Image (cartoon, helix red, strand yellow):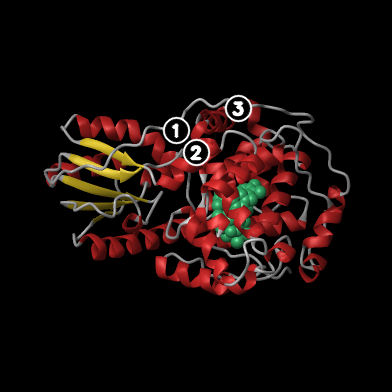
Amino acid sequence: MTRDLFPPDTIQFASTRSDALQQLQEFVPFAGRYSRHRNHVLPGHKNVSRLSPAIRHRLITEEECSTAPLERYAPSTIEKFTQEVYWRRYWKAWLSLRPQVWSNYLDDLQLINDSPRYETARERASLCQSAKGPVALMNHFAKELQTTGYLHNHARMWFAGWWIHVERLPWQLGAHFFFKNLLDADPASNTLSWRWVAGLQTPGKTYLPRRSNIEKYMSPDLLDTLQEGLEILETPTAAHPGAQERDRITHPSPDPETLPDNRNAGIWVHEEDLLPEASPLSTLKPKAVLVSGNFEAWEKFEFCEPKRKWLMAALEDACFRTENHFRVSPEIVTQTHQLQSITKWARREKLSQVVALRPQVGPLADLIPSIRQDLASHDVELLLLDRATDRAARSLATGSFFSFWKKCQKEFPELSA
Ligand SMILES: Cc1cc2nc3c(=O)[nH]c(=O)nc-3n(C[C@H](O)[C@H](O)[C@H](O)COP(=O)(O)OP(=O)(O)OC[C@H]3O[C@@H](n4cnc5c(N)ncnc54)[C@H](O)[C@@H]3O)c2cc1C
């Protein structure tokens, strides 16, 4: 019998803005010890912030996360935490400049799922996902992921490394397993982290899960009960030795679209960014507001039940805040076809313009051309606005993370506070 790392009844991931802000405040006293303790995988995961679902869907912003600890600590003391928040920014910006990496992943995934050539890999992957693999610790992580919607970063690295380099399974199947179960599942952080572990993201870097590293960082109490199969991780070797792929920038940062001055404009709030009241949309006086989830993606990517529940709660919270801010009672779309619901709403409200925050690369961004076209066929214009910080980050993510980080230290005021 293994003890749960994070029994579902003892872990909550803030699904409202006010809970996320409170969770951030509660984390601040720990931020000073973050760099020393963050790599340990401990019951309760109190050594890390656990804010990723809220940051992913922008219930809180990256700036809020990196400035809050400055109330108590010098920037140098909390640099590691800030850097992690900026890893997220880097991955998002990096993928925005190279969206073909996302579409190649989707194509590969489709091929692996459809082709008879991958039948054995699919069967093996299914066993590993059902926690019936040969390494008890990895079975434990598979269960934890599906029960709680979360895994510690180090557990994600060990699991992905074992999947790719030991089980020799396609990384795309593992990335999909994470994407459908993680509450914080993000097209950029997830896809690019899996590629990084595989050795495809950063030339010369492959992540191998080693028993010695697991014994150093995994809670000893838990590891004692999870010894079976650990010997398999004594000397793993890279599945793709020397793999190097340099992905070219194929999609320069889009030109900023300008704020409309239009009394027939409606605001569309979507799950990629649930903070319209603190965004370029905040000064608009919309005629109507729509809050919608990307339900097509929930189906297509087989989102698990806890993830759907978390997203519903976050959408409802956005509805509530949106109404307070814009003084317009929003319509919330529950289960329906994304394209039709936006167009129907725009027509019903007699809008000539729909304004939204630009979704970055991922399932919603993939739908934008057809949503735009469908609206245009009814004479409604779709206008997508960027947060200035997203735009700035995109212009800086042309090289490695550390060159990005150096440039960000000049660009972002919170880093030189
Ligand atoms: C294989 C793999 C898949 C991953 N998939 C995702 C994903 O889908 N979504 C996601 O948000 N993160 C992903 N990560 C990154 C990281 O594991 C999580 O962001 C982190 O574990 C979230 O926990 P936390 O909020 O307690 O993080 P903290 O340690 O408290 O860090 C604070 C914030 O910084 C950001 N962050 C921290 N570490 C990283 C990192 N390595 N890369 C990018 N951002 C980071 C997150 O927004 C996080 O909330 C993945 C990592 C790996 C190795």
Residue 132: image x %, image y %? 70, 52
Between the residue at mark 1 and the residue at mark 2, the CA separation in whole angstroms equals: 6 Å
The residue indicated by pointer 3 is 247
Marks 1,2: beta carbons within 8 A: yes
The residue indicated by pointer 1 is 253
Earlier sequence position, callout 3 versus callout 2:
3
Q: Is residue 273 left or right of residue 221?
A: left
The residue indicated by pointer 2 is 394
- The three-letter amino acid code for the residue at tag 2 is Arg
- Quadrant of the frame with the C terminus: bottom right
Q: In this view, does 69 lie to the left or right of 299?
A: right
User: Quick check: 260 above or below 134?
Assistant: above
Between the residue at mark 3 and the residue at mark 2, the CA separation in whole angstroms equals: 15 Å
- The three-letter amino acid code for the residue at tag 1 is Ser
Other residues around mark 2 within 10 Å, as few (<14) / some (14–19) / many (≥20): many
Who is closer to the viewer here, 96 or 408?
408
User: Quick check: 232 above or below 215?
Assistant: above
Residue at image position (70%, 55%) is 154
